[in-house]
Image (cartoon, rainbow, N blue to C red):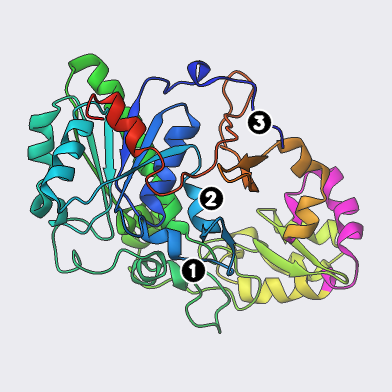
């Protein structure tokens, strides 16, 4: 859990300034990823309360007066306190915008325009700026005013009908899937826009939204749907893992745990599982007759332990894996080899263990020990940098 030995000057985005006006998850997560890559990220917050995420605790965990969630997605940033409805503060923010390379916000459509920081105004202040806006459902249409929240977007996207088994109701993904996917799309778009600016000198407007990210995540399934009979695909009665996944694709209970089995020819499974009944099914029926095939596999797999089956299947290159919970994962040698954890130290001296960037540069993961900023902690320093102190 040691920090990388790289200095900010070694990282790809050294010298890039990012203004993070966003709150909650998708926008701040994207800005944090840019900070991981070496950018100077300045979080612009309300003087009273700051980012609403400071008061939104997950698992009732707090650190130095702010939620642990806030700390987890705002590390390695500076905080600039400004009331955007105050004319004097707004002018200071405009001066800050003039020095920036990227600006991120996730206000609902129309809010930044009413404040006086819409794209057209900002482009006049800084033609080279990449203006990145995050919304729930895009900027037009009947859903534009709906709350851009992960569970709500999952519910509208069709994703909740892909998890669970056939008898279950809708099952959401158990983490903020669309927020994270949208943040990743935002980062990709920002980096592409910066490359274009390197050629043309011009910035531009980048827009991403949770619903479009949900469609993109389902591109494989939606391609099947729109090029098929356009009926909702049925989930398997047991061991569902992909609505278009042929048997054996799924998770099965063993005598002492669970085993995931991916794409494998039925004839091969009949041999390895010593299950002659599978030979009655032609490979072309593996999807259509999955609800007949999977119960046969489940009954056989339940007879032995997970380790027993891994000892049989892994040497033959069958795609399979044990199912780990977090404690088991944390104790595994594979997890240790990832070197994915780091210790963050906040200004108050508190320490927090967090996940590092998933990327490596020159063999090392970018990491910084600097935690999330206290609200407005860097306002005076930044004003002095602007010559406004």
Between the residue at mark 3 and the residue at mark 1, the CA separation in whole angstroms equals 39 Å
Nearer to us of marks 3 and 1 is 3
Q: Is residue 123 left or right of residue 268?
A: left
Does residue 323 belong to the magenta stretch? yes
Between the residue at mark 2 and the residue at mark 1, the CA separation in whole angstroms equals 29 Å
Mark 3 or mark 1: which comes first in sequence?
3
Residue 48, relative to residue 239: is it above or below? above
Quarter of the figure with the C terminus: top left
Dots 3, 1 in contact, CB < 8 A:
no
Residue interval drawn in magenta = 300-325
Q: Nearer the viewer, residue 324 or 80?
A: 80
Q: Nearer the viewer, residue 131 or 241?
A: 131
Residue 200, relative to residue 297: is it above or below? above
Between the residue at mark 2 and the residue at mark 3, the CA separation in whole angstroms equals 16 Å
Q: Is residue 23 left or right of residue 368?
A: left
Q: Nearer the viewer, residue 31 or 269?
A: 31
Nearer to us of marks 2 and 1 is 2
Determine the secondary structure under disc 2. Answer: helix
Label at residue 3: 3
Label at residue 243: none
State the image quarter where residue 63 is shown. Answer: bottom right
Crowding at label 1, few (<14), some or many (≥20) Cα neighbours within 10 Å? many
Residue at figure coordinates x 44%, y 59% from the top left: 54
Does residue 367 belong to the magenta stretch? no
User: Residue 164's x, y, as percent?
Assistant: 57, 74
Q: Is residue 44 left or right of residue 361?
A: left
From the image, tell me which residue sits under label 2.
72
Quarter of the figure with the N terminus: top right
User: Residue 106's x, y, as percent?
Assistant: 28, 52
From the image, tell me which residue sits under label 1.
162
Determine the secondary structure under disc 3. Answer: loop
């Amino acid at each position: 859990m040691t920090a990388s030995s790289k200095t900010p000057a070694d990282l790809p985005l050294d010298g890039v300034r990012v203004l993070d006006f966003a709150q909650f998850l998708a926008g701040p997560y994207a800005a944090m990823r840019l900070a991981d890559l070496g950018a100077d990220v300045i979080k612009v917050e309300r003087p009273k309360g700051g980012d609403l995420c400071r008061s939104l605790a997950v698992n009732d965990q707090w650190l130095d007066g702010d939620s642990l969630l806030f700390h987890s997605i705002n590390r390695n940033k500076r905080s600039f306190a400004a009331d955007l409805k105050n004319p004097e503060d707004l002018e200071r923010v405009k001066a800050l915008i003039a020095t920036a390379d990227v600006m991120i916000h996730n206000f609902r459509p129309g809010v930044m325009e009413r404040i006086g920081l819409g794209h057209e105004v900002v482009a006049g202040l800084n033609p080279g700026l990449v203006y990145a806006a995050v919304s729930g459902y895009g900027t037009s249409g009947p859903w534009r005013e709906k709350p851009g929240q992960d569970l709500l977007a999952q519910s509208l996207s069709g994703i909740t009908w892909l998890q669970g088994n056939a008898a279950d109701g809708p099952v959401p993904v158990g983490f903020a899937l669309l927020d994270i996917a949208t943040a990743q799309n935002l980062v990709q778009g920002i980096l592409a826009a910066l490359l274009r600016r390197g050629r043309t000198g011009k910035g531009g407007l980048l827009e991403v939204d949770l619903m479009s990210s949900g469609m993109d995540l389902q591109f494989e399934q939606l391609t099947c749907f729109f090029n098929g009979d356009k009926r909702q695909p049925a989930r398997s009665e047991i061991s569902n893992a992909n609505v278009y996944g042929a048997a054996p694709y799924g998770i099965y209970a063993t005598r002492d745990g669970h085993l995931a089995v991916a794409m494998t020819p039925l004839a091969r499974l009949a041999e390895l599982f010593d299950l002659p009944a599978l030979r009655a099914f032609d490979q072309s029926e593996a999807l259509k007759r999955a609800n007949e095939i999977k119960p046969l596999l489940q009954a056989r797999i339940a007879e032995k332990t997970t380790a027993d089956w891994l000892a049989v299947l892994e040497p033959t290159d069958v795609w399979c894996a044990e199912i780990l919970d977090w404690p088991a994962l944390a104790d595994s040698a594979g997890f240790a080899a990832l070197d994915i954890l780091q210790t963050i130290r906040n200004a108050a001296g508190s320490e927090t263990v967090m996940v590092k960037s998933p990327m490596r540069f020159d063999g090392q993961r970018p990491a910084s020990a600097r935690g999330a900023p206290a609200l407005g902690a860097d306002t005076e320093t930044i004003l002095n940098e602007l010559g406004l102190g």
